[in-house]
Amino acid sequence: MTVVQANSFTTISTTAAPPKRRRRSFVTLLFGDLTASCLTVLTGFLLLSFVPALNWAIIDATWVTTDPSTCRQGGACWAFILAKFRFIIFGTYPPDEQWRPLLVMALMLLMVLASLSPRLWGMKLLCAWGAVITAMLLLMWGGVMGLSPVPSSAWGGLPVTLLLALLSLGLGFPFAVMLALGRRSILPVPRLLAILTIELVRGLPLVGLLFVASILLPLLLPAGWSIDKLARTLAALTVFAAAYLAEVIRGGLQGVSPGQAEAAKALGIPSWKIIWHIVLPQALQKVIPPLTNTTIVMVKNTSLVLIVGVFDMLSAGRVAATDPQWPAPYVESYIFVAGIYFLICFGISNYSRWLESCVQARSYR
Amino acid sequence: MKNWTIGIVALAAALSTTAAHAGPTLDKVKERGHIVCGASQGTVGFGAPDDKGYWRGLDVETCRAVAVAVFGDREKVEFVPLSGQQRIPALQTGEIDILPRTLTWTLQRDANGINFTTPNYYEFTGFMVAKASGVTKVEEMTGASVCVQTGSTTEVVVNDVSSKLKLDLRPVVFDNVAATRQAFFSGRCDALITDASALASVRATQSSNPDDYVIFPATKYMDALTPAVRHGDDQWMDIVNWSIQALLNAELYGITQANVDEMLESDDPRTRRFLGVEPGNGKALGLDDRFAYNIVKQLGNYGEMFERNVGKGSPLKVDRGPNRLFIDGGLMFPMAFQ
């Protein structure tokens, strides 16, 4: 009963005298009413429970050491990350050729930065991407221009994660647009094909698709044929990305009022131009948030290739931690890999927010 | 999820028995210029990339020995990391030429499209428990939680022992050796089950007080980890077999990486035949006559390989135990190299 009184009293006093609110002390802010007090105490306990973790991660941690056994004292072993940095990032790629994946990542970063602004989007940028991706694959593969060949089974780490994410989304996107248009087509054959493909792929777990691509596919191929393991994995990821992106794009297509296409038709504009210049741009603008969502999901999905023996960043982190000279520093290894994933995905989501505001500003101008 | 995974793998196995990819592997390998070898996704001591991404381990070096036999160069190998489910289909479809990947020789596998060559590691399982628990044999372990490495034969042993003796053991599964051991010593489970040859050294090196722990065998059964090849290419199987035999014979004759050149001057006819001073052996297999010399020169004999990767020279410190040569009381039996 008293609590209720106190509660109502504070409410009244603050509403009655607004200037006082600014001078409200820290204590009233934290323990002003029952809800605030409860939340403060709970938060306090929560923060306290983080103290051992902080202790482990910072104070007791071993930062630099050349002798792995000094890491057995209980704190986090960040020296391990330092020692295994090269392996986690580049995996089993030959160390002498390490500059190649490094250059690939630099190229990728450059191209991503160059294509950030929607003003630069166009055929030229698309061609540039095509050229850069070819260059990146040639760099990784070698065998040309005096570069020693490196089989895809020796690729690993972050470049593989990035290449898989980029290529599966990049190759999946045109398919997705076709599937989405097919699904909304009035022609029965493309519509049925698109529906069948989308529903089939969406009805299967990605892990299942990966198993089919990596185990069943080679057995179904005629004797003597073999497709590169990484390429098969990429194909599975691409099909999966295409099906999900298609449904997102279909949502956008449905959001564009049919009056626009009808008006364009009345003006005698050919139907592919209607789709390319009128319907698709508006549809894609509408679905930037769900597209970002699918992109982030696909970046993280690439880590599932672990189960089919592709040496992506997560596999490399896992293998690095199995070195018996170090005291099984799994937590450190996974935290490091998680940090890199977070940076990538956080970057994508921030960019999409900026892009959305950018596009909105333009369309309402 | 487990069910359909098993389904896919079973379907793959069914398909593979109908599709016979027989062919002269040696010609294919020579044309390609290197051997493609199935590797694990990181099993320390047997096959794992080091900090520089260079593959190391007993299985990896077994594969390198075959590369030396064929090309005279231990670097002429490509390692393809494979998951447990993938490894056998990958061999059957010709994606890889040899599968040395801690693969236990079993009837079902042998009958389903692959051939086993010569075992390169014998493994039997043991339990380690804290002395304070008072347990001294398997029958007393009722209700214990057991730290076990997933995908290994020890996982099967835990289930078999548990159901046979009605012990109600609770497996706590980890995905590799180091994590399993770490978990046991931090008190996560009552018992640790692993390769018995390794247990003593694990106790010696990783526990704070070795006297606090006791070790006893889990079963009387033993596994032979054996590199496998495809069905239907006998010549290739011979080459893999005799590359492994060369490692074993070298140890029997006392030939090491260090003294192999001196041994070329030896008067012993067996040694001379082995090293190819007296020709015949290599030619019979379609290889260079000095292939055994090359293997020992580049990789050493089996004993050296064992100690370097899993034994005294490695952080695993596994005791040779059953992996000693037969003359030392082990199971490794070199066949007559003539």
Image: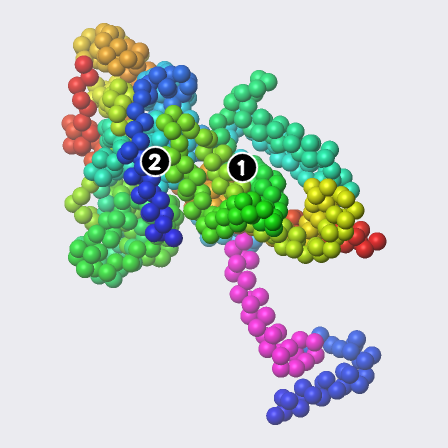
Front residue of B201 and B12: B12
Asked if residue B224 can be seen in this view, the reply is: no
In the displayed structure image, the side of residue A259 where residue B315 appears, left or right: left
- Quarter of the image where the C terminus of chain B is located: top left
Residue range highlighted in magenta: A28-57
User: x and y percent of residue B54 in the render?
Assistant: 45, 29
Q: Name the residue: 83% across, 79% down.
A: A19
Residue flagged by tag 2: what amino acid is it? Answer: Pro
Q: Name the residue: 24% across, 28% down.
A: B117
Chain label for disc 2: B
Asked if residue B5 can be seen in this view, the reply is: yes
User: x and y percent of residue A175 in the render?
Assistant: 58, 41
Q: Secondary structure at mark 1?
A: helix
Query: Which residue, given by chain and number where applicable, does mark 2 sit on?
Result: B89
In the displayed structure image, the side of residue B286 where residue A29 appears, left or right: right
* Disc on res. A160: 1
Q: Name the residue: 72% across, 45% down.
A: A274
Q: Is residue A152 above or below residue B215?
A: above
Q: Is residue A57 above or below residue A141?
A: below
Q: Is residue A215 above or below residue B255?
A: below
Dominant secondary-structure state across the stretch colored magenta: helix
Label 2 Cα neighbours within 10 Å, binned few <14 / some 14-19 / many ≥20: many
